[in-house]
Structures are given as structure tokens and as C-alpha cells.
Amino acid sequence: MTARIAVFASGAGSNLEALLQHVGQASSPGFGAYAVALVVSNRVGAGALAIATRHAVSATVLPDPADGQALVNLLGQHEIDIIALAGYLKAIPAAVTDAYRGRALNVHPALLPAFGGRGMYGLRVHRAVIEAGVRVSGVTVHFVDALYDHGPIITQWPVPVRSEDSPETLAHRVLRVEHALYPRVLAAVGTGRVRLDANGRVRGEVFDAGETATFTLQLGEATACA
Ligand code: GRF
């Protein structure tokens, strides 16, 4: 069965675009297990809304992002199986995190639990990474709980921080990884290959043995160590 995904986005929507590009690629390993059925935003001017329109995907701007019951109803109307946060800057109400436990995911442009939490978004994340002097950043995909950037981690992929990096150049390489990784993770959760168990532990792996080598090659320069 194809999982129906709602993508929540407040910004440009490049992750939404990446997810849409992988829809229907059933012949590619790990892909083709979901359909983007709805785009949800809190911002009328979000680039993600224009992308939704271009791809003929239903889109909506929430009048009150804190109204959990309205959001649960909306997701029910669209028969949404999985929520994918992609640059969504509002808190997800408890009614939604409860209803979608183990079925709501977020992508974060750093290696959590470092460089996450309220106010840590966009270039702020990459600026903090560079200022801290760490030599490895990366991408985290995790299940969503009631706190920002906090739920059980599904997978992480490293991206080296180079000495000449600016927040912008680092963001660019990290985004390339997000675009490749997030569709794979959503497909893995959509097919039940990865799941959250009753104790809050993540079960299953996103990649089969040997697949990481192909994935590394696909990413090329983005994650190559200097
Ligand atoms: C991404 O870096 C994502 O990890 C973070 O917000 C950014 C959204 O970018 N949560 P886009 O709107 O998908 O281009």
C-alpha cells in the first residue's frame, strides 16, 4: 500500500521538491512507497505552496497552527498516514503528535542532539556549528514528539565541516544530503521497514547491507572528507 504523506513546510520547500521527485520511482531501491497527498504551511508566502501548486498537490495554510483538533481533522479528511516536517517552524500540537506517534518525522540540518531546539533553524544552525568549531555536521531524521528536534532518532548522515566553510556553503552541502536521505527514510517508514516500538525505540534500518556504499557514491562531493 502507498503511504499518504502530508509535508509541513514554512520555507522554500526544497525538501518537498526532493520528496516529490522521488514519488513514483518504484524501480529505484528504497523509493516509491509513498505519495505526497497534502502540503501544510503556516505562511501564505511559503515557497513550498508554489511547489505544491506546480505539482497539483492539495495545499493549505493553517489559520491557527496551535489548533490541534482542527489539524487532526484536516489530516483525517486527507487520509494522511505519515507527517513529514520539512522546515516547519511552528510547534506541532500534542493532539497531532499523539495521533501520529511513530508516524510523524522531522529532518534537521545537524547531528542532534547538538545544534537543535527552539530557534535553531536555517542558517542559525550552520553558523552555530562553525562557531563551535566542530569538524563534522550532518543530517538527522527523527520521529517527532512534543519537544522541538527531540524525538527518537531514525538515522543520521555525516557531512564534514571544511575550514573554508561559511554557513551558506555548509548549508548547501547539508541540503544535498537531506534531499537524498529524507525520501529514503520516508519510504522505509511508509513500508514498515523502520518503526517506533512501544518502548519508544526505533526498530529496523533505513539501508540494507551494501546500500550505504551506493548512497555514498550518489552523494559524491557533498560528504567526502577533505
Ligand atoms: C532544511 O534544512 C531542514 O532540515 C530544516 O529546514 C530546512 C528547510 O529547507 N528543518 P527547505 O524549505 O526544505 O528548502
Image (cartoon, helix red, strand yellow):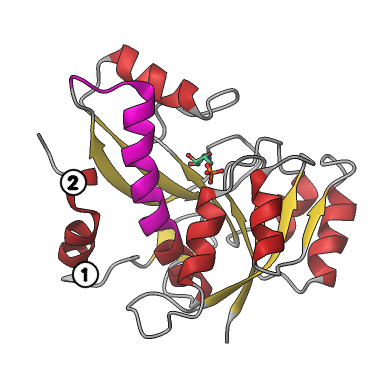
- Report the residue at 35% width, 48% height from top: 176
Sooner in the amino-acid sequence: mark 2 or mark 1 = 1
Q: Nearer the viewer, residue 220 or 77?
A: 220
Give me the disc on residue 153.
Answer: none
Q: Position of residue 77 (x, y in %)?
A: 85, 71
Q: Position of residue 225 (x, y in %)?
A: 12, 38
Give me the disc on residue 221.
Answer: 2
- Res 111 seen here: no
Instruction: Tell me the SS state at disc 1.
Output: helix
Which residue is tagged 1? 211
Magenta stretch bounds: 163-182
Q: Amino acid at mark 2?
A: Glu
Classify residue 189 as left or right of residue 13.
left
Figure quadrant of the C terminus: top left
Location of residue 11 by image quarter: top right
The main secondary structure of the magenta stretch is: helix
Q: Marks 2 and 1, Cα distance to the nearest angstrom? A: 18 Å
Q: Amino acid at mark 1?
A: Glu
From the viewer's perspective, is residue 115 above or below residue 106? above
From the viewer's perspective, is residue 111 above or below residue 217? above
